[in-house]
Every structure is written in structure tokens, then in C-alpha cells.
Image (cartoon, rainbow, N blue to C red):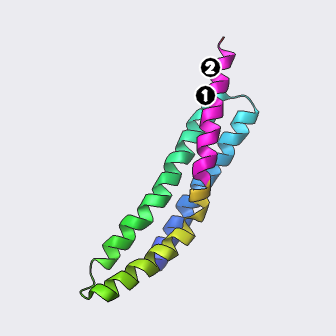
Amino acid sequence: MTHALCALMILLGLVTLGAAVLGLRALLQRRWRHGTTLGLLAAAGGVACGALPVALASAIASGSADAAQKAQLLAETLATLLNCAAAGLLALPLGGIVALASLVGGLRSRR
């Protein structure tokens, strides 16, 4: 089950990083609305890549009866899923910067 979740987190991370890169491309082409939208999408995906592993790991570990076994399973699952979500976590600050720069560029061009 952890392999399927890891594959899901890798896919989510790559899609999120792709949105950030497309947002950066739109920013360089001065397509402000597209840059803002894709930047916000990448930032939201980055937040999801950080929050989903915590929720999934705690749900997986909740089935264990022993507290020590539960803590170990939680730590192992969380570490695995966060490693798989690294691309999405990288896209979080990049998406925020792209969204902010596109928003400022769009507001300046309207003057």
C-alpha cells in the first residue's frame, strides 16, 4: 500500500512542479493572468504535498495497537511519503514567487 501512495505522491509532486514551471514560463512571456493562476495552483499543490503525507501516515499508523510500533510505523511512512513528495514541496516557494510576481506585473501593466 505504501508503494501506491508513494507513486501518487510522486505524481502529485511532478504535476505541481510542472505547474510552477509553466507559471514561470507564462511570467517570462508576460502573460500575467496565466502566471498568477499557475503560480497559485503550484503553491496549493505544494501545500497538499506537505499535508497529505502527514494525514496518510497518521491514518496508516492508527491501525497499530502497540504505541511503540505505531510511532515507528508513523515515522517510516511519513519519511517515505515526504521523500516522494519532494518535487511538490520544491514547487511551493517557486509557485508563490511566480504568483506574486505575475500579480505585481499584471497590476503594473494596467496603469
Q: Residue farthest to the left?
A: 65
Whether residue 27 is situated above or below residue 8 in the rendered picture:
above
Res. 103 mark: 1
Res. 107 mark: 2
- Disc 1 packing (10 Å; few <14; some 14–19; many ≥20): many
- Disc 2 packing (10 Å; few <14; some 14–19; many ≥20): few
Name the residue rendered at 33%, 78% in the picture. Answer: 61
Q: Magenta part of the protein: which range? A: 91-110
The quadrant in which residue 58 appears is bottom left
Whether residue 18 is situated above or below residue 8 in the rendered picture:
above
Side (left or right) of 31 relative to 82:
right
Q: Quadrant of the C terminus?
A: top right
**How would you classify the magenta stretch by its main secondary structure?**
helix
Whether residue 33 is situated above or below residue 3 in the rendered picture:
above
Give how far across and how far down residue 109 sits, in percent. 69, 17
The quadrant in which residue 102 appears is top right
Q: Residue farthest to the top?
A: 111
